[in-house]
């Protein structure tokens, strides 16, 4: 049976309402911001840091599903970990005047000017997981302050006073200027400042590369054989660090913490003691949330006060030794 545009719009709003109410944002089904309910034929462009990884592939899968369901186009412009190319791809995407632009920021500043330009040109920008300094129409992603704080608190518990351990910690960001690393480091160091026994012996970025994380970790372990914990800012590159710990035969002594999208590869790494504890923001769920927000933005949705719509991703903590750990991961 053919569904008219008004019915489509109302169904979309009902589908989205639970997400938005959970974020503290409420919309009336008859609100003027949702009057344009026919989103068929509209255009969405996604510019990720790189495809070919479960994080972005998981997001894209869910966004494509919604695009096919509701009849709007969804194109991907893959920067393939090239920040220079990413700026060029975003500039080209803006020139094509899509209705919604989905940006995956590699740093807090790189795309800020272009995000501002896109919004000024009437293009709604959804920032996904990594946020720029420049606000936009919407953001879907992890609460990095919470993750940094909780992991630091767990490290203090495992490595701090009364643990009988050295208190030495190595931090491995992806990039020191990436939004997640900036916020998590700030939150973690704030916790560590209250515990003089905790000593951060290394804070070197891996540029998101597992082999570079492995090399950094090998050097840190040579210099600090009594290292207690590693805090990696993304599970994929932190697996390189975990492999260096296993190479040194220290997987039962050095705890490897990470954050990530929580796919089945992560659960296997936890099972194999390459990673010990992962704060997962569930990339599959993020993809569904992002797709829902895109549907709303295409209908003209906006916060009543003009602020950025923000959907925080629920957390799942995956721990080695937990018999239910595998159930917390998703599979492509």
Image (tube, helix red, strand yellow):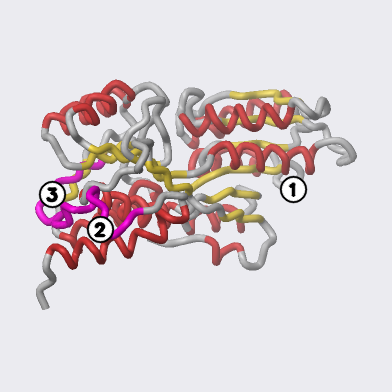
Mark 2 burial class by Cα count in 10 Å: few <14, some 14-19, many 20+: few
**Residue 3 position in % (x across, y down):** 13, 71
Give the alpha-carbon distance from disc 3 to disc 1, as whole Å: 53 Å
Residue 290, above or below 15: above
The residue that appears at 22% across and 50% down in the rendered structure is 32
Q: Position of residue 64 (x, y in %)?
A: 24, 56
**Mark 1 crowdedness (10 Å alpha carbons): few <14, some 14-19, many ≥20:** few
Instruction: Say which quarter of the image contains residue 117.
Output: top left
> Is 74 covered by the magenta stretch?
no
Residue 106, given in percent of the width and then of the height, sits at 39, 30
Label 1, label 2: how far apart the Cα atoms are? 58 Å
Which stretch did the figure color magenta?
27-46
Residue, disc 3: 42
Q: Residue at x 41, y 25 (%)?
A: 133
Question: Dots 3 and 1: beta carbons under 8 Å?
Answer: no
Q: Earlier in the sequence, mark 1 or mark 2?
A: 2
User: Any magenta on residue 33?
Assistant: yes
Q: Nearer the viewer, residue 327 or 250?
A: 327
**Disc 2: which residue:** 30
Q: Earlier in the sequence, mark 3 or mark 2?
A: 2
Instruction: Report the predominant secondary structure element of the magenta stretch.
Output: loop
Residue sitting at 70 percent across and 23 percent down? 201
- Asked if the residue at tag 2 contacts the one at tag 1, i.e. Cβ–Cβ closer than 8 Å, the answer is no
- Label 2 sits on a secondary structure element that is loop
- Residue drawn at (31%, 28%) of the image: 82
Residue on which the image places disc 1: 252
Which quadrant would the C terminus be assigned to in this image?
bottom left
Point out the image quarter for the N terminus: bottom left
Q: Tell whether 112 sits left or right of 181.
A: left
Q: Earlier in the sequence, mark 3 or mark 1?
A: 3
Secondary element type, mark 3: loop
In this orientation, which residue lies closer to the viewer: 247 or 77?
77
């Amino acid at each position: 049976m053919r569904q008219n545009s008004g019915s489509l719009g109302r169904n979309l709003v009902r589908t989205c309402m639970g997400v938005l109410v959970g974020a503290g944002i409420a919309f009336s089904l008859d609100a003027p911001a949702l009057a344009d309910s026919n989103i068929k034929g509209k255009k969405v462009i996604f510019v990720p840091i790189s495809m070919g990884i479960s994080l972005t592939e998981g997001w894209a899968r869910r966004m494509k599903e919604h695009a096919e369901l509701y009849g709007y186009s969804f194109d991907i412009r893959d920067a393939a970990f090239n920040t220079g190319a990413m700026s060029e791809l975003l500039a080209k995407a803006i020139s094509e005047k899509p209705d919604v632009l989905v940006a995956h920021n590699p740093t807090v500043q790189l795309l800020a000017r272009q995000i501002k330009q896109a919004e000024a040109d009437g293009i709604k920008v959804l920032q996904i997981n990594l946020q720029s300094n420049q606000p936009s129409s919407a953001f879907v992603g992890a609460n990095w302050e919470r993750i940094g704080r909780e992991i630091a608190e767990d490290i203090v518990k495992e490595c701090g006073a009364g643990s009988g351990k050295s208190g030495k910690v190595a931090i491995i960001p992806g990039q020191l200027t990436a939004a997640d690393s900036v916020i998590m480091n700030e939150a973690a160091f704030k916790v560590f400042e209250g515990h003089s026994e905790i000593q951060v012996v290394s804070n070197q970025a891996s540029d998101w590369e597992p082999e570079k994380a492995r090399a950094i970790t090998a050097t840190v372990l040579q210099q600090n054989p009594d290292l207690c914990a590693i805090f990696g800012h993304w599970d994929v590159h932190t697996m390189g660090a975990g492999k260096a710990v296993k190479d040194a035969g220290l997987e039962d002594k050095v705890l490897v913490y990470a954050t990530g999208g929580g796919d089945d590869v992560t659960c296997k790494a936890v099972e194999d003691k390459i990673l010990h504890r992962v704060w997962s923001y569930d990339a599959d769920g993020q993809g569904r949330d992002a797709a829902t927000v895109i549907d709303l933005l295409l209908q003209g949705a906006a916060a009543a006060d003009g602020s950025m719509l923000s959907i925080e991703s629920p957390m799942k903590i995956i721990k080695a030794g937990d018999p239910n750990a595998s159930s917390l991961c998703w599979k492509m």
